[in-house]
Each structure stands twice: as C-alpha cells, then as structure tokens.
Amino acid sequence: AMKRGPPPPIDGLSWPVTGTDEEGKEQRSTQTTGKEILAAALGAVDETAADAVRNERGWRFKYRKHFVKSVEVSARSPDAALKVAAAGLDYMYDKFEFIRDGKTYVLRDALSQIKGSFSTGFVKGSKPKPSKYELEVPYNGTILKGDSLHKQIDKWVRQGVCELSCGAAISQVASAEPWLDLSDRYFVLLGAGAAMGPFQVLLSLGANIIAVDIGRPEIWKRLISQTKDSCGTITFPMTPGFKQPSTPNDALYEASGCNLFTQTPEIKNWLREVTPAEGACVGGYAYIPGDLFPRVALAMDVIIKELVETRGAAVAFLCTPTDAHLVPAAAHAAAKAAIKTAPLWQKMANLVSMGKWCVPNARKPITTASGETLYVCDALVVPQGPNYALAKRMQHWRAMLSRASGSVVSSNVAPSTRTLSVMQNKLFSYGYATMHHFRPFEIPGPELSNSVMTALLIHDLREPMHAGHPDMPLVNPQQIFSQGSFHGGAWRCAFTFDSIGAPSVLLYYVLHFLVKYYLAAYNAVQTAGWGYVLFKAIAHYFLGGVAGAATAWDAFGVPLFLFQNLAGLEVAHAATGMVRAGFATTLLQVFSRFAIVYIMAYTPSIQDSWSIQPTVFAWSITEVIRYSWYALNTLGAVPTAHTWLRFTTFLPLYPLGVFGEMAVMHAALPAAAGTLVLGAVPIDTVTYYMVYPLWLSGLALLYTHMLSQRTKVLAKARAQAGKNKDA
C-alpha cells in the first residue's frame, strides 16, 4: 500500500491545539473545541447547561439536544440571547489560532497585527439598464412573474411551504418595481460563487458586487463573464501589484481571488478600503463541508464584524431549515394539527421504529422571563454533524449582535435545496426525491431558492418593517429568524426533519422499485382494458355489431364494468401516497364513475340507450390516452406528442363525457319512477336540482384545473424539447 506523506503544514486560521499524541505531536480536536465553544456561550447565562455540554460523551451523535438547549436558554430574555452570542464568538476569537510563516497568533491579535491588502479589479457589465425591472422566479420549468408569481406565493403560504410573512415580503418586492433597481446598492459577497448565493440575481438587477472567493481561474472567469453579460458591476481582489488588463484574459483570472482561511486579515483590510460607508450589505455565503465550515464561518465573521463596525453595513445570511429556531405560533399550531391528518403509514412508521421515525414536530412551548410564550422547532439533522450546527449557530450569533449594534439584518431561512453538491450524495438525493410525501415539504432547485431568497434580501434592505430591522420591537432577538422563513415545510410538517430522513430514503426504494413497476403494470393493464372497451364499442356502433350482442351493454358492458371497478384501486394509491393525487378528489372522481357504471349495469331498460354511446367513447378514448401516458411517465419515457394528447384531448372529451353521464341518469329515471330519496323527495327532483348542478360544477372545477395543468405541462415539455435540441 502507498504510504501517506506527512500532512501539509498548517497555515492561516486554524482550530486551537487541544492536546498532544503519544509522539508529542499537537492535536486539534474539533469536537473538543466545539463543545468548549458552546459551553462558553451557555456559561454566560446557564452554567448547568454549560456543564452538561462539557460532560457529554459521544458528542458527534449527541450534540443535538445541546444546540436546542442553547435556543431555549437564549429565549429566556433579550439580554440572555445577546450574552450567549457574545460569549460564544469571543471564545473563538480568543482561542482560534492564525498561523503565518510558522508563527502562531491568537486570532484576535493576528487581525490587528497583520497588515497588507490586495490590488483592486473592476468590471462593468455591457448591458444597458432596462427600462423596467421585474422579479422573475424560475419554478418547475417556467418563469413566474406578475400574477402567476403572486398566485404561486399564495399557494406556498396556504400549503405551509413558507410563512405568511415570507409570502407577503416576496409579493411586496414583486409589486414594488423601484425596489428592484439595485444600481444604488453595494453587496459584499463572501463566497460569491456559492451555489446558494445571490450573485446572478443581483447582477440582473444592476447591483454593484464586491466579490470574495477562492483564487481559482475557472471561478473568476465565470464570475467576470457573468458580470460582463449584465447591467451590474463587480469589484474583486487581485494579487498585490497586478495591473488589470483592458480586456479580461487568462492572466486576470489567474490573478483574481483570495483565500478566506490564509488571508483573513488582508481581506478584512482590503474590504474596509473598497466598501462604501453607505448603502452596503455584507453577506456570508461560503460553505465547505466538515471541520472547514466553522473555520470559514469564523473567517467570514471577522470580515462582517469589521464592516459592521467601520462601515455600518447591513448583514445577510441564509439560515438553514435544518436547525433549531424560534417559530411563529401559527407554525407550531400547524405542525401540531398535521399529526391528525398524517397518513396512517407515517404514524405506523413511528411504532415500527420504536419512536425513532416520524417523531412529532410540535414541542412543548417555553415561557420567557417576562412571561411570554415562545415556540421552538427542532429541525437539526444529526448526520450533518456538530461542525455544521456550530457554523450556523455562529451566524445566528453575529446576526443578533449586529442588529443590537444598529445594523439591518437579513437572515431568513432558506429551503433545503437540490444543489449539485447535495444531490451527489445518493442518500440525500433519494430522501429529497420522496420528501414531498411528508406534507407540506417541497425541496426546490437552486434557481428558485436563489430568486426567492434574493427577493427577501431586497425586502429587508428596502422595508423597515421586518424583524431584522433594529427599530422593530421583538420579544427575543432570535425572532429575527422567525419571520420571512421559506423553510420548505420543515416548521409545519407533522414530524421532525431528522426523523423523516430514513423513512424518506426507504420510501424512495419502495416507490422507485416496487411501486414504480406496480404502477407501470397497473396503468398498462388499464390501457389494454380500456383499449379493448374502445375496440368493442367501435365494432358495435360502426362495424356491424358484435356477434351475439343484442345491446350495447352486451357488446362491451362486462369489460367496461370490470375496468371501471378496477379504478377503485386509485383511491388506495392516493390514500397511501403512492401517487401525488389528492385523496378526496380521487375518491369523488372514482365514485361518480362508479355511480354511472352501476346505473348502466343494473338498469336493463337503458342498456341499449343512445346515452351510452357518448359516454363510452368519451371514457374509453380518455382512459387509453391517460393510462398509457401514466405508464410511460412512470418509466420516464413519454414522447412529447403523447403529452400533448394527454393535455389536449380532454378539451372536447370531458364535456362529452359529462353530457353522456347526465343523459344516462336521465334515461334511467323512468325505471326508478316513484322512488323517494330519504322517503320524502322524488328521485327525479333530486337528479335535476341537486345531482345535475353538482355534476356541472364538478366539470367546471376539473376543466379549470386541467386547463391550468395544460399550460404548465406543455410549457415544461416545450422547454425540455428545446434543451434536448440544443444538446
């Protein structure tokens, strides 16, 4: 086996030494230091909670309850929250090390002693400023804007994907066109190239960006090229002494960038020089997994603290939903109520796993020192690890301290997102693919997340009436993160985020192997069955009849009755979450079909009625197209033309079917003459004045829904076809 060489020498911002090994070599335990950081923070208010952290064994898998405790301790009073935040960050500034050329500094000392800076690069976009800005949000293959955006925002709020304050803020930005002109604003982006960062959206709105990212040519080529193709500007660090060429080239890309770990003091010094004293916002967006995340979070904290103190900059972070937060009372109530409506299989999962899966989300409320009631949502995900939780907690601490010092803070909860790095992890990929079965979860793509989170950032910078503004009264500073949350359903789901991860992955395997092929087979059988019904109907009405069949029902009644009854399984499909169709809607649709087919089967006098003809053709043609589309879609192999048929043929067939069904009911009334519904109302009166209006209103609702679906699906299909053509 190949021997590993010695580890590279430590350089830059580093975890502190926690001990030595048997050979006398320094050890830097992230778990030991992580515990000490949280203990120091809690110790400022609650020494018992701090001791519990220090005495915790198996920190890697037992850290969660202590981070939740930190939220509860901080919730006791505004003073408690700020003391915890200050103590935690002060401990890190005093204990973390900065190593330069073999010399070790305490981080706080390095920041004041190490001088130096960078040369400054600047690129202005080549596009003119548009005559009008409009908020655009990519979603499911379409671009939402104007009325379509407002409708979708309303839907997200009603579903529980985001909070009402979040929906209202995005709608306000979409309606306030002057707010979208960002040519007067400066944004310092730490981690400008991050997948979840606002770089591209801000550029499209004419913003002036001061970009900080690692010195890799491919990154700077992308950032500078995107800027050139916009109406915004970018200011960026370059190697000291480098002169920017008139036209961007490889030499410029090579000289651009910096390292947050190893050049922290120089970046701080440079940004103090180039950041304007007014209209600036500094955002921490860099993310590196593992033990590097708290280090890069601390490097960003150094810079943010400096710009808040010297430039009065606003502060921006993206909070993760997989954390512990104070949440609105409405979110807590929704999570509590969701338990009652959760599918039976999800409740059974809790029993089968002995309480490990599908754990109730709603926690017992806490009472503050002043008697206020607050609610905590614990959405921490243990596999993410204590380093991730610590880094996100540091951002909370800085946000609260910055607001207390008078800075505006925009630190809204962003949804868990299907970024490329996340989806490369198969377990996360599988879990995200099926998490929508735990309503109201929705896991969007990065384009949506970037757009809505940038809209919330704009709102917080333009509108003083929000939790992150220092003049807005709050019960507790942690409520900064309670408003404007686009949590993707984490706060309102019946179950905790951590407890649905494993069942989501298991569900993926079930749905994509067992259920997938079962549904494909079911839909294939239904396609063949309704095809047979259609064939028999054509033979009866247009090809001289079916041998031995005296009536229409004799010709095709048996297969019609069989395959319509088989559709009763679709109610079970919806109830168990095997398909995304609503249970109530599916039940009503299937029941209405059952009513008609049973009238046909048990009313001999109408079995050769003309009313059966439009009904059977409308049903069979629709079902052959619909079930074959479902079968192919389940296998991911639907031709574009087939999609067009699926979402176009309903235009004439749905009204024809309803007409035929109403005609069948009318034809059957003589056979039921004298029947009194509930012993009082004649059946024909009920049919004409109750059933018919319900049938027509049902057609209107279904027709409207299908028209909406048609617009979305065909637009998505055209977009996909265009991508395939370009490829």
Image (tube, rainbow, N blue to C red):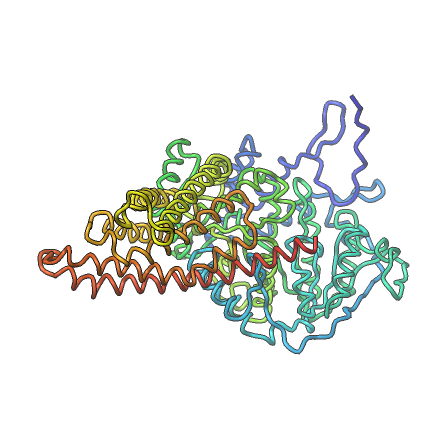
Q: Residue at x 69, y 48 (%)?
A: 296
> In the current view of this chain or complex, which residue is farthest to the front?
544
Judge left or right: residue 475 versus residue 267: left
In the image, residue 125 sits, relative to residue 81, either above or below, namely below
Q: Position of residue 670 (x, y in %)?
A: 15, 58
> In the current view of this chain or complex, which residue is farthest to the top?
1
Q: Residue at x 33, y 43 (%)?
A: 559
Judge left or right: residue 213 versus residue 629: right
Judge left or right: residue 98 versus residue 719: right
Residue 243, image quadrant = bottom right
Q: Position of residue 170 (x, y in %)?
A: 53, 66
Q: Position of residue 608 (x, y in %)?
A: 25, 53
In the image, residue 528 sits, relative to residue 410, either above or below, namely above
Residue 715, image quadrant = bottom right
> In the current view of this chain or complex, which residue is farthest to the bottom?
131
Q: Position of residue 509 (x, y in %)?
A: 50, 35
Q: Residue at x 25, y 57 (%)?
A: 664
Q: Is residue 349 visible?
A: yes
In the image, residue 566 sits, relative to residue 253, either above or below, namely above
